[in-house]
Each structure stands twice: as structure tokens, then as C-alpha cells.
Amino acid sequence: MSGEFMVNDLKRRLVEIREKNFEEAATIIARLLRDEYKRLEEAMKKYRASYLRMNVDDPAQQNDVADLRLQAIEAYRPAYIIEDFLTDMGVDVIPLMPQYNGAFEASSYKNGEWLVSMVSLRENAMRTLGGHCNVIGDVVILERLLYDHAYLAAVMRQTDDYEPGKQTFVELDFYTVVFDEDIQAMVRLPLENK
């Protein structure tokens, strides 16, 4: 409940900034986003350090790993709200996002195709994603580099109309944060112009 209150309060604050400072609203909100990224980086450093101290293959720590992933998702939420608000105002937020040198970049769109990065998670770690979801066999796609080896990832599952041997589609099931997992594959997906 308090999380939802925080979300509504942040949205209300962004609307007030836009209404009271229409000419400078994008600049002011972009500054808020940069501040949020700094806070997020510190939070992700803490979460990643906690994760590295855990044994993710130890069944006794599965709930702790799941809780940590959920905390990381919640920590990212304010930045996502501000990004979404700026995008609705017509601002390109990609240049505002932090870049970490030497780290693997997440999925991106370039020259008419998506470069999709899929991550391979250890079986026990997969069982703990979301605290309740067994995502073994699903596709985990890196979407956003949040901080040095800490990624926002989309867990995709096959649609209900899947039949072996036929083309299949995937749909978003839920988001998670992954720390230090191995990159399994880079797949280029051409987009047809219609």
C-alpha cells in the first residue's frame, strides 16, 4: 500500500511540475531522473553486493534471492515512472540513461532489427524469480542495464497457442532483476516493414 502511495505521489508531483513550469518542465524532470539514477546506482551496488554474498544454488537461500530481486525491481520503479512521464512529453530518455563502460549492453533496436540478449540462469535461481514463479523453460531477455552486471530483465513465456513444429510467439510474463548471470545468446530479430 505504501508503495502505491509513493507511485501516486510521484506522478502527482510530476504533473505539478509540468503545469507550473511548462517551458522548463522537461529540464526539471530530466534533472529529477538523473538524481533518481544516482540513487538507483547506490541501491543496485548494495543489492548486488548482497547477492554476491549469497549461494544462489543453496535451497535454503532461495527465498532470500527472490526477495532481493523483488527489492531491486521496487528500487527501479521511481526511475521507470519518471522515464515514462518524460517519454509521454516527447523527450528521448535514452541519452539520459547511465552507461557503464565495459559492461554488456542490454537489448537494443538498430538498423531495422532488434538485438535481443538472452540470459541463462541457474536452475535454482530460476525457481526463485518473483518469489513464486517457476520459469524454467521460459526466455529471460535483458532489457536494461541498471548498474554494472545488474539488469532489468523481462521473463517471457510462450503463448497458449504453441504447437511443436509451428512458429510460436512469446509474451511478457513478469519482470525481474538479474545479477552476474552468463549471457546465453545474442539473437538478431529483423523487423518487417508493413
Image: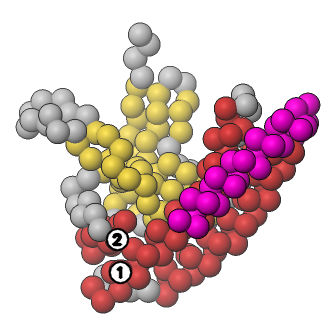
Q: Nearer the viewer, residue 185 or 140?
A: 140
Q: Is residue 185 above or below residue 103?
A: above
Q: Where residue 23 sits in the image (x, y, percent)?
A: 91, 31
Q: Is residue 21 magenta?
A: yes
Q: Quadrant of the C terminus?
A: top left
Left or right: residue 192 compared with residue 74: left
Q: Residue at x 41, y 35 (%)?
A: 188
Residue beneath disc 1: 63
Q: Report helix, strand or loop for mark 1.
A: helix
Q: Report helix, strand or loop for mark 2.
A: helix
Q: Is residue 164 magenta?
A: no
Q: Amino acid at mark 1?
A: Asn
Residue at the farthest top position: 194
Which contiguous range is marked in magenta? 1-27
Left or right: residue 149 compared with residue 102: left
Q: Where residue 64 sits in the image (x, y, percent)?
A: 41, 82
Q: Residues within 10 Å of mark 2 (few under 14, many from 20)?
A: some
Left or right: residue 141 compared with residue 104: left
Residue beneath disc 2: 131
Q: Is residue 43 above or below residue 11?
A: below
Contact between marks 1 and 2 (CB within 8 A): the answer is yes
Q: Where residue 75 sits in the image (x, y, percent)?
A: 60, 65
